[in-house]
Image: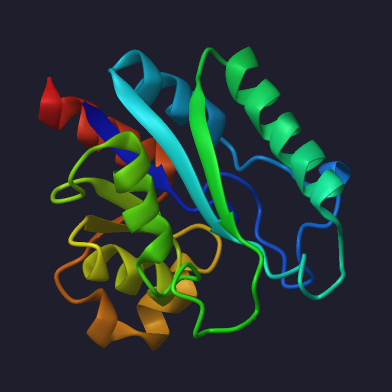
Amino acid sequence: MKLIILDRDGVVNEESDAFIKSPEEWIPLPGSLEAIARLSHAGYRVVVATNQSGLARGLFDLHTLNLIHRKMHRMAQEMGGLIDAVFFCPDVDEANPFRKPNPGMFLEIGRRLKCALTGVPVVGDSARDIRAARAANAWPLLVRTGKGAKTLEQDLGICANVEVFDDLAAVADFLIARSG
């Protein structure tokens, strides 16, 4: 099985320091849904893994988060793509083993899909995505979208030996060419 794990905000959709609190605020990044479609057609199972502390902060409820994700699924399907699953951590507490930068969410994905994460690409835009991928023995990839450009400037140490791409479309191009 070919698996790819994507962070949501800043990778699939526009980032917001004020959180994505409604389906209307969820706006896909240019080319991201097409990239998901190409990855799906190339045989990848696409899974989204996202911290969603806005739930614990009371900024939105679970019903609203489900509506946001329903929109994401629908729009990906309209482009011919499939998001197999969405995993999220609603907690603010950094000690939660499932909250990135901890690897628990990724390890749970591997457990549920019955696959080792070694070599599985994890696409993120922040140091916490890279740290979580490394801790789960996955393959961290950084995009410049979202917080990615800022992460490159501020966290050079954590970005060492991490391949960097302009966006999710560039990641899809690279992975599909590599596996083809």
When asked about the image quadrant of residue 128, the answer is: bottom left
Query: Of 58 and 169, which appears nearest the observer?
Result: 58
Left or right of 71, for residue 150 = left
**Left or right of 108 in this view: 73:** right
Q: Is residue 32 above or below residue 16?
A: above
Q: Quadrant of the N terminus?
A: top left
Colour scheme employed for the rendering of this structure = rainbow
Total numbered badges shown on the rendered structure: 0
* Residue 31 appears in the rendering: no
Instruction: Decide if residue 151 is on the left or right side of residue 62.
Output: left
Q: Quadrant of residue 136?
A: bottom left
**Res. 91 in view:** yes
Answer above or below: position of 31 versus 94: above
* Residue at screen point 76% across, 72% down: 56
Q: Quadrant of the C terminus?
A: top left
Which residue is located at x 55 percent, y 57 percent?
50
Residue 162: percent from the left, percent from the top? 21, 65
Vertical comparison of 39 with 125: above or below: above
Closer to the camera, 39 or 168?
Answer: 39
Q: Can you tell which quarter of the image residue 67 is in?
A: top right
State the residue in front, 152 or 64: 64
At 72% from the left and 65% from the top, the residue drawn is: 16
> Looking at the image, is 64 positioned above or below residue 176?
below
Rendering coords of residue 61 (x, y %): 85, 56
Q: Nearer the viewer, residue 149 or 93?
A: 93
Q: Position of residue 143 (x, y in %)?
A: 40, 56
**Residue 18: percent from left, percent from top:** 79, 71
